[in-house]
Image (cartoon, rainbow, N blue to C red):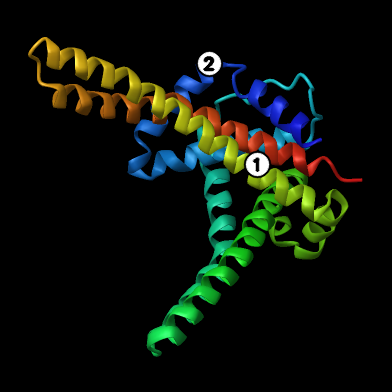
Amino acid sequence: MILDIYKDALEYSAKDWKTLVILGVICLFSFLLLPAFLITGYNYRVINNAVHGIINGRDPLPDFNDLIAMFVDGVKVVIVQVLYLIVPMIIFLVFAIIAGQLTGVASSALMLIGCLITLIVGVAACLMYQMGICHMAYNEGAFSKAFALSEIKEVIDEIGWFECIATYIGLIIIIIVIASVVTALIGIIFTAFGISGAVLGADPSGIFVLGAFINSVITMFIVGPYLSIFAARSMGLLYTMQV
């Protein structure tokens, strides 16, 4: 099941390069914050398609239109994420404050325990908000459904907590591997250019700086949008795996 989800999502994310280019352009301006909500809103549309579809279906990528509605959806998703992540953040701050009042081994031990608890609660919170967003999409965008904890827990129970956590962690690993491979390939290419430039008397540092810049642009312009759609599709399909 998990591998089928990944396969579908990887293929689905590359269906329409025109959409990826549009998202890439918006990503380049995401530092302005407002465009970031459009990207989040588009990923919500991807999730919406997935929760109403099937694995290995013929779903097209969502249309990039009605920007106001897309922006509103993006804001709703961000609010859901923030509210779910407040809990692990509070837990970490409480342990950090208490540990700050102690000294030596006791402080370090308490901080370590706090980090472990925060990590466990954080993973659960991330999974809950992902499923919450899917649950909201499945229920016609009803914002309250993102916080229907008993219903969301029931969904995860039916899919299986192990399957959900394994899918989520695997998703993170795939994203890191793809991003790392692209970064490494660009680095290798510009390292070779740098060595060649040094042989020819050119300044290799300038080539390395150019490589770092191009790496950042490619990551934001192509890899970032592709991976965001991949993640959204994967979580949406996971939601459909209820018994």
Q: Nearer the viewer, residue 194 or 76?
A: 194
In this picture, is 23 found above or below 146?
above
In this picture, is 77 found above or below 66?
below
Q: Residue furthest top?
A: 200
Q: Position of residue 35 (x, y in %)?
A: 41, 38
- The answer to whether residue 69 of the structure is visible from this angle is no
Crowding around mark 2 (Cα neighbors within 10 Å: few <14, some 14 to 19, many 20+) is few
Identify the residue shown where x is 85% and y is 56%: 157
Q: Report if the CB atoms under discs 2 and 1 are less than 8 Å apart.
A: no
In this picture, is 85 found above or below 3?
below
* Location of residue 140 (image quadrant): top right
Q: Give the CA separation, mark 2 to mark 1.
A: 25 Å
Q: Secondary structure at mark 2?
A: helix
**Position of the C terminus by quadrant:** top right
Identify the residue shown where x is 59% and y is 71%: 117
Q: Nearer the viewer, residue 111 or 96?
A: 111
Mark 2 or 1: the one toward you: 1
Q: Position of residue 48 (x, y in %)?
A: 70, 37
| Direction from residue 128 to residue 22 in the image, left or right | left
**Position of the N terminus by quadrant:** top right
Q: Position of residue 139 (x, y in %)?
A: 77, 47
Q: Residue furthest left?
A: 201
Q: Residue furthest right?
A: 243
Q: For the residue marked with disc 2, what is the amino acid? A: Trp
